[in-house]
Image: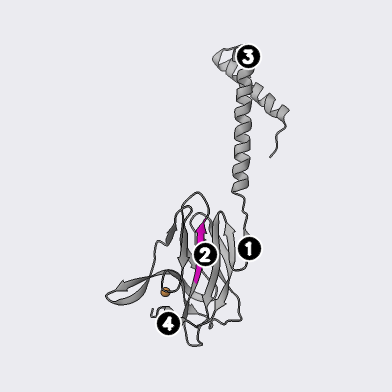
């Protein structure tokens, strides 16, 4: 969108003409100073609108297992390799809300599992159990959340095949404001598995 100044100025004059018709004031009563003020106000709002359009442009950038969209930065997306028998696995990431408004990680989806959920770990009696976070995970403006071993995580159940170290897996994260983000996850080994929960769904 670009409007020549002359066009804007004739638009302002048109507005002033209408104002004169409606309010029965003469052009000279409105005065050159006021018309300059109106022109300045219009130019300001045009530039403001343009800068908003720029800020909200879909500026998705990709790097290694990370991406940014609408100010949501995802880093270190990893998925855990499985044994041939395992029917489920977990994925982890660091998510930073770089934007000026709160967002929510509503869920995730993958093509290689029947069901993908956001889980939390909770102490039930003296046993750590995981359960679904139905409302997702809120990420306030400026806040960083970690999906990590022993904490909140992305859970994929009903795997169509074991997760292998040398394969690449794409995970789509669903954010309330930022929308969908699809990233390639780094596959991590089963080593250190004792730090994770048992998969009993
Ligand atoms: Cu889980």
Dot 1 falls on a residue whose secondary structure is strand
Marks 1, 4: nearer the viewer? 4
The residue that disc 2 covers is 173
Q: Is residue 126 above or below residue 28?
A: below
| Residue drawn at (55%, 68%) of the image | 76
Give the alpha-carbon distance from disc 2 to disc 1, as whole Å: 14 Å
| Res 152 quadrant in image | bottom left
Give the alpha-carbon distance from disc 3 to disc 4, as whole Å: 81 Å
Classified by dominant secondary structure, the portion drawn in magenta counts as strand
Image coordinates for residue 46, horizontal then vertical, percent:
62, 35
| Residue drawn at (62%, 27%) of the image | 40
Dot 2 falls on a residue whose secondary structure is strand
User: Is the residue indicated by label 2 positioned so its CB lies within 8 Å of ligand 1?
Assistant: no
User: Is the residue indicated by label 4 positioned so its CB lies within 8 Å of ligand 1?
Assistant: no
Q: Is residue 120 above or below residue 70?
A: below
The residue that disc 3 covers is 27
Give the alpha-carbon distance from disc 1 to disc 4, as whole Å: 32 Å
Residue nearest the viewer, comparing 32 with 11: 32
Q: Looking at the image, tell me whether mark 2 or mark 3 is earlier in sequence order.
A: 3
The residue that disc 1 covers is 62
Q: Looking at the image, tell me whether mark 2 or mark 1 is earlier in sequence order.
A: 1
| Res 66 quadrant in image | bottom right
Image coordinates for residue 186, horizontal then vertical, percent:
57, 74
Image coordinates for residue 190, horizontal then vertical, percent:
50, 83
Q: Outermost residue toward the left?
A: 125
Disc 4 to disc 2: CB gap under 8 Å: no
Residue 115 is left or right of residue 47, and the answer is left
Give the alpha-carbon distance from disc 2 to disc 3, as whole Å: 57 Å
Segment tinted magenta in the rendering: 92-97
The residue that disc 4 covers is 194
Dot 3 falls on a residue whose secondary structure is helix
Q: Looking at the image, tell me whether mark 3 or mark 1 is earlier in sequence order.
A: 3
């Amino acid at each position: 969108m670009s409007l020549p100044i002359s066009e804007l100025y004739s638009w302002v004059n048109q507005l002033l003409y209408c104002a004169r018709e409606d309010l029965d004031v003469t052009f000279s009563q409105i005065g050159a100073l006021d018309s300059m003020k109106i022109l300045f106000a219009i130019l300001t709002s045009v530039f403001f609108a343009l800068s908003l359009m720029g800020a909200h442009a879909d500026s998705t950038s990709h790097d290694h297992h990370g991406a940014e969209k609408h100010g949501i930065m995802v880093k270190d997306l990893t998925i855990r390799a499985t044994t041939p028998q395992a029917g489920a696995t977990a994925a982890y990431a660091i998510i930073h809300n770089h934007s000026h408004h709160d967002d929510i990680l509503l869920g995730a989806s993958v093509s290689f599992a029947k069901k993908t959920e956001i889980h939390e770990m909770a102490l039930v009696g003296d046993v750590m159990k995981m359960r679904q976070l139905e409302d997702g995970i809120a990420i306030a403006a400026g806040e960083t959340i970690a999906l990590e071993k022993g904490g909140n995580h992305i859970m994929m159940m009903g795997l169509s095949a074991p997760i292998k170290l040398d394969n690449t897996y794409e995970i789509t994260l669903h954010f309330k404001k930022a929308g969908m983000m699809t990233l390639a996850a780094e596959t991590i080994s089963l080593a250190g598995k004792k730090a994770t929960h048992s998969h009993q769904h």
